[in-house]
Image (cartoon, grey):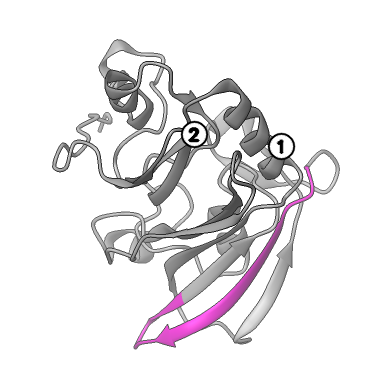
Amino acid sequence: MSFIYSPPTQPYLDIIYQDQQLVVFNKPSGLLTVPGKAIEHKDSLEYRARLVWPEIRLVHRLDMSTSGIVIMALTADSQRQLNWQFQLRQTKKHYIANVWGHLTAKTGTIDLPLVCDWPNRPKQKVCYEHGKPSLTHYQVITQDKDSSRIMLTPVTGRSHQLRVHMQWLGHPILGDKFYAHSEAFVKTNRLQLHAESLTISHPELKNEIQFNCPCPF
């Protein structure tokens, strides 16, 4: 069955914060962060934001299926400073996820190198020979009969990092069409992964500022 892109439109843009230097959005699950190559994939958070702020600039992105905080810059200098913070791992962020099963340890760290699985793009895979270092901390919040709610804190920012790390641990994120087994995939109608909190140093004011967006699932 072929994929049909049908992003949510209500609300069209969910703005958490804005000033003269940056805008912070709550991206819904199902909306691309940036336009895809095909014309039918043009609709995206960046495209919608550019209709309001033609000068807006990308800083980072979330997977289409992941919801939560995305920050964009309104000036070239703000973009450079924010990009620098992400590259130097000076930002603080965490995600909320519902995963399959019960984790043995209530807290832990996953340190596995990741590389693109080229024959199966956009999937990623663990590769000790060619993979880039990838580090994730996790903490169990609650558990129910057959799943766990956890907080994920990525130290690095590799593509699909949280999704592959949880799959490798034996606890794929619920609703994950790429990495979850069939039982975990059909348990929910969306990927249960949400970028809940992001802390940065304001590019102009230089003070630490934290953005929070409550998990919708």
The picture places residue 2, in percent across and down from the top left corner, at 27, 29
Q: Which residue is mark 2?
A: 21
- Residues 77 and 147: in front is 77
Q: Which residue is mark 1?
A: 84
Check disc 1 and give the amino acid type.
Answer: Trp
State whether residue 24 appears in this view: yes
- Gap in angstroms between the C-alphas marked 2 and 1: 15 Å
Crowd tier of the residue under label 2, counting other residues whose Cα lies within 10 Å: few below 14, some 14–19, many 20 or above: some
The extreme front residue here reads: 205
The picture places residue 170, in percent across and down from the top left corner, at 57, 69
- Residues 129 and 80: in front is 80
The picture places residue 143, in percent across and down from the top left corner, at 41, 86
Check disc 2 and give the amino acid type.
Answer: Gln
State whether residue 27 appears in this view: no
Q: Which residue lies at the image location 44% right of the left edge and 43% below the top edge?
A: 70
Q: Quadrant of the N terminus?
A: top left
Residue 194 located within the stretch drawn in magenta: no
Q: Which residue lies at the image location 70% right of the left edge and 51% below the top edge?
A: 156
Q: Which mark is residue 159?
A: none
**Mark 2 vs mark 1: in front:** 2
Name which quarter of the figure residue 162 lies in.
bottom right
The extreme left residue here reads: 10
Q: Main secondary structure of the magenta part?
A: strand
The extreme right residue here reads: 129
The picture places residue 74, in percent across and down from the top left corner, at 47, 27
Q: Quadrant of the C terminus?
A: bottom left
Q: Secondary structure at mark 1?
A: helix
Specify the segment rendered in magenta: 132-149
Q: Which residue lies at the image location 50% right of the left edge and 37% below the top edge?
A: 61
